[in-house]
Amino acid sequence: MKSKVISTLMAFIMLFSFPGMAFADDGDPNIDGGGGGMGDGTSTDSWTPGMDGVRVSIVNVDTGAVMGTPIDYTNKGPSPEYHFEKKSKIHYRSGAVLSPVTSTYQCKKPSPAMPIIISNSGKNNIEAVKRYFCSEYVANMIALDYGISFETLTSGKYKLLLEPIAYFKFQGKQVAMTAHEAALYDQQLSGGLRSTMVSLSHKNLPLAMFLERPDLGFPVFSGNTAGRQSNDTIIASLGLGTVTYTELEELPEPSEYDVVYRVNTEVITAVTLNASKEINPDAPATVTFNVMGRTYTMSNIVIPEGESQVVWCKWITPAAEQAVTVTVSTNKGYLSDNRINANIVDLSQNPPPDPKADDRNDSFRAVSPPSNTQKISARWTVWWARWHPNWVWISVWVRHYYSDGTSYRCDHGYWQDQGWYDFFTDIYTASLTAESKIKPDSKAPTASGNTMKSGYGVNNTVTSGFTTNAPASHVTGAQTAISWFPEFGYNTYWRLLDLINRGYSSRLEFTQNLYSTYDQRVHFVPVWYPNGEYNVYTWLLDAWTPAGMLSMDLNNSVDIQGSVFDDWHIGPKR
């Protein structure tokens, strides 16, 4: 059964609005949003973008009652030191009060991951958010987590109430709050939350979601979508969205793989370690990666309270295609991921077929070369700490007595270092440069410079330059290059290049051609290829850093004038 999803859904904070943005063709969006930038915070009061989630409540359309206990979904692994009993905006409207708790925070990590919920940079994707919460896959997930059937949830008798959640540090403690809870808590503190966290608690968090049409007894918000809001306004009309299921949009199921690597390649697998409490040199963190029976350890990790750092291992993928699971554990803090499913692929399996002298392609039309997502630079940081001594005299007063019974007091104290650790970061960078050089093969006898006839072969030499200030344990040079060709529309077939020189200044060339009489590292230009530019597109990749893989698009060409048949000479018959 297909049904229509009417989303009274969320308006996400942006630095600008998106007038006229459409929902699905058969949908009825109710979307608006606001917000703006935030400061950097302090050592005791701060929020990191991405530390967000959504509280989901199932509401009976007829009675307005909330079914069971709301569920909190987040892509992260927060460990707040205190939070509040899970109640919805409807519960609080009906008279419920804030109930702080310090027990373990219960939440679920959705799959696929949610889009950004709270942003201070305008980078959230409204279309992705609408598709996510209005999708059949997510509806199935929520129904399963609530213990009800998918058919019941989507019968039209229920709708979802969504409330954004922020995970942040307040007064030196990690906390979790919805917008409604933050407003109620600020009232209890007589403005104490607003005074330090106003850009989050009273702007970006409440403006992350609000209604365009009245729903569930809550009004439309029509105020300033870029300004700080009062507690009364937040409680009345901010920090909520609704989803009514009447037709479901399909969302592709998540891939079973988190990352794809190439066979026999040196790679960096990285996750983020978060510190809810200070991790210092007295008791540093150790992160352990288990890969194919081998253990890789990153130790002596230090991170100040409330901060995070990328952690990684460097390993070589197997020589054969297979699935590999990397598990990650730590003795301190919490990780962004504890399990990474990697797909190891072999790209050498799809070279072009043997070209023939009588091949034709009368309908050929040249197309522009493609492009992949390039990343030619990366930046990452590593924390370190240094002891800051602070010597304090500890007095120990002792009474001494004279023989006549009189006494005096003497300080037998001592100096004690009551210092602390100061934290610093080492900033590392890496950048990639490269060139692809396409030239006529040495077996093309009539080639001149960069001009040649069709039917002969071309060589491709890719040279790369990898520059970094990081230790070798952090990075790899470029190791893989793949070329696509214009006669196939840069599709269907490709050639994998051999890594001739490994390292920061790597060199790669075509693998030896199976159809070359002389085993040349060559690709044959089809004999029918028309005069003009013959452009080879190459994607250079597998230059790894803790901040991800660097890659580049490369293009280079030769000029085709004539064909191999022009070099044939037919002599007289004797």
Image (tube, helix red, strand yellow):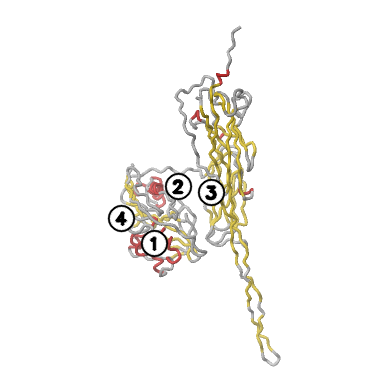
Closer to the camera in the image, 243 or 117? 117
Task: Name the residue beneath numbered marker 1.
Answer: 228
Q: What is the quadrant of residue 299 in the picture?
A: bottom right
Q: Is residue 95 left or right of residue 554?
A: left
Binning the other alpha carbons within 10 Å of mark 3 as few (below 14), some (14 to 19) or many (20 upward) gives some
Q: Secondary structure at mark 1?
A: loop
Q: Nearer the viewer, mark 2 or mark 1?
A: 1
Q: Position of residue 320 (x, y in %)?
A: 59, 37
Mark 4: amino acid: Asp
Task: Name the residue beneath numbered marker 4.
Answer: 215
The disc, 3 or 4, on the residue closer to the chain's N-terminal end is: 4
Circles 4, 2 touching at the beta carbon (< 8 Å): no
Task: Name the residue beneath numbered marker 2.
Answer: 112
The disc, 3 or 1, on the residue closer to the chain's N-terminal end is: 1
Task: Name the residue beneath numbered marker 3.
Answer: 339
Q: Secondary structure at mark 2?
A: loop
Circles 2, 1 touching at the beta carbon (< 8 Å): no
Give the Cα distance between marks 4 and 1: 23 Å
Q: Position of residue 549 (x, y in %)?
A: 55, 45
Q: Nearer the viewer, mark 3 or mark 2?
A: 2
Residue 34 in the image: above or below residue 487: below
Q: What is the quadrant of residue 352 in the picture?
A: top right
Binning the other alpha carbons within 10 Å of mark 1 as few (below 14), some (14 to 19) or many (20 upward) gives many
- Image quadrant holding the C terminus, namely top right
Q: Position of residue 72 (x, y in %)?
A: 43, 56
Mark 3: amino acid: Arg
